[in-house]
Amino acid sequence: MTSTYETLRSRLQSAFNALEVGADPALRTSDRSDYQANGVMSLAKRLGRPPREVADAVVQALDVEGLASVEIAGPGFLNLTLETSFLDSRLRALRGDARLGIEMGVERRVVIDYSAPNVAKEMHVGHLRSTVIGDALARMNRFAGHEVIARNHVGDWGTPFGMLIEHLLDLGEDQAVATLSIGDLDGFYKEARVKFEADDAFKGRSRARVVALQSGDPETLRLWHVLVNESIAYFSEVYAKLDVTLTPDDVVGESYYNDLLEGVVHDLDAAGLLVESEGALCVFPPGFQNREGQPLPLIVQKSDDGFGYAASDLAAVRDRVNVLRADEMLYVVGAPQVQHLEMVFAVARLAGWLPERVRCEQVVFGNVLGKDHKMFKSREGQSVKLVTLIDEAIERAYVILDERGTDLDGDAKFHLAEQIARAAIKYADLSTERQHDYVFDLERMIAFEGDTGPYLQYAHARVRSIFRRAGDDTPPDAHFALAEAAERELALGLLALPEAFSASLAALQPHRLCTYLFDLAQRFTSFYDACPVLSSEGALRDERLALCDLTARMLRLGLSVLGIDAPEQM
RNA sequence: GCCCUCGUAGCUCAGCGGAUAGAGCAUUGGCCUCCGAAGCCAUGUGCGCAGGUUCGACUCCUGUCGAGGGCACCA
């Protein structure tokens, strides 16, 4: 169904078109009325006519009969107040719509590159944002009707693998697997690193092993596979704990592109883009400079003939465009890699590998900071393991549940604590503008009051409790009279999901959807406070139950596309 | 030195070129014989600084101060 906002917007567009084709009505929500159109003033400026006169002309041409009343205010604002009969018909249509007003988009294939941990290295807070934001974007895109291909570009190749394989051999394969399978990737990696730094013989073996790996020695490859498979199994456990949709099938690591790297170099050369500089094969995309103001290279092949990450990133672009047939490619990668990816995209465009029709964007995000506003670290100065983070949140949720008193126990209680913990962590991450750094404060994010994941879950659980008491009888047919102000405010909130969702997705900013959901939850709790549901009677009771039903469904849907559960009871 | 991002209330954060800049937390004061008070209602304070563009600027541009990041073979 066409959304309320879109219905109004298109009517306004027609009216504006009568004065200037394509003039933007600039329709926004308003605190003066339900919606306001701000487009008159800029149009008047362009036409060289007085704004009030233009406003009059727009209103003359505007057909919103049965939808809204219009008032001209101030210098030329158009304030629109929706008719109750219109709200009623919208809400009734919404009740029968499983998608709650959000239309299916034109089908597109969207490749989303996110999470990207390293084999034989711990997943730590540094991976949190990519994983959480990427997964939310994946879910939102899927719900919008797009085909999502997730790509977990794990670090599974490169010089560290010589040292890691040698360490595996030193430990003995069984012992190494045992260590890795309990998830102690951190210990494993660090021990290898320490030996590498301190022991020249080990260092020598490691280097030889890298050569063996790169030349495809079967036994070395087998050992490498052991590391990779154990790591992927561990990552899957972490994803399950976070309720992230990534699976082992989504893992397409750097090594996947090995066979394509020669082709990248060859084709860049054939295109006349490749330049040898200081022994390395480089492309110099325009507009990038180094410290000395000289052109900055994207190094495709290093002076030792090895391939850098730029080569595999370029190969990945080609693979995603040509093989996966991506319409859109998103890289959920942190701010430090902005320049690198800009250069990769620039080179891909220069080489003609990245057509204009393919939207290709880095979804940049800021750092996770500690309360001291420095990079989030443990007390010992180590980066914090993701599993530790989640476990602490679960423990905290457990304590809070006990304090509040809960009917649940055993598995059900633990499951709920997990749901709350995930909601706290994910919502805190998703609800701030992603490009900003944010402060990780478990106490605040898991609090059940305020703008938090658990608060939204609570709002949902409260609505659901009404239906438990009512005996689950949502009225099949309700009319919305919206006599109380709180009912009307809630209704307007319920009708605004489509634009909140599509704006959030279009800008790749999940926090916009979070803001919407929090606002909706507040509208609901105000309504809940002011308008008794179960003790009211007849048509009023039906109406209020229907509002509750829509609210619950909307909160559940909104949270689910963010990757957050909405428990029935808390 | 050059480039990028960011400076909004005591704290954590929203803010789409539009009317008096909003939430949450914290503060203070109200509200439970009534559907979950994990809530609701009320309460004061602020756009780093200086210019410019515009009918209109937190938003765009320039400069400046401050914080973070990047700037040739690690990803």
Image: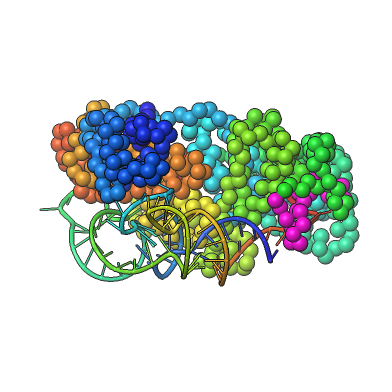
Colour scheme of the picture: rainbow
Residue A113 occupies quadrant:
top right
Residue A460 within the magenta-colored segment of the rendering: no
Residue A226, given in percent of the width and then of the height, sits at 75, 43
Instruction: Please report the bounds of the magenta region as a residue range.
Output: A287-305
Question: Which quarter of the rendered picture does the N terminus of chain A lie within?
Answer: top left
Residue A503, given in percent of the width and then of the height, sits at 45, 41
* SS assignment for the magenta stretch, majority: loop
Residue drawn at x 29%, y 31% is A61
**Vertical relation: A491 (above or below) A368:** above
Task: Answer whether residue A186 is visible to the viewer in this image.
Answer: yes
Task: Answer whether residue A234 is visible to the viewer in this image.
Answer: no
**Vertical relation: A439 (above or below) A209:** below
Residue A242, given in percent of the width and then of the height, sits at 53, 47
The residue lying furthest to the front in this view is: A48
Residue A394, given in percent of the width and then of the height, sits at 48, 54
Residue drawn at x 33%, y 27% is A96
Residue B44 occupies quadrant:
bottom left
Tell me: A433 left or right of B26: right
Residue A290 within the magenta-colored segment of the rendering: yes
**Vertical relation: A323 (above or below) A519:** above
**Toward the viewer: A537 or A339?**
A339
Tell me: A309 left or right of A356: right
Residue drawn at x 44%, y 61% is A443
**Vertical relation: A552 (above or below) A407:** above
**Toward the viewer: A20 or A63?**
A20
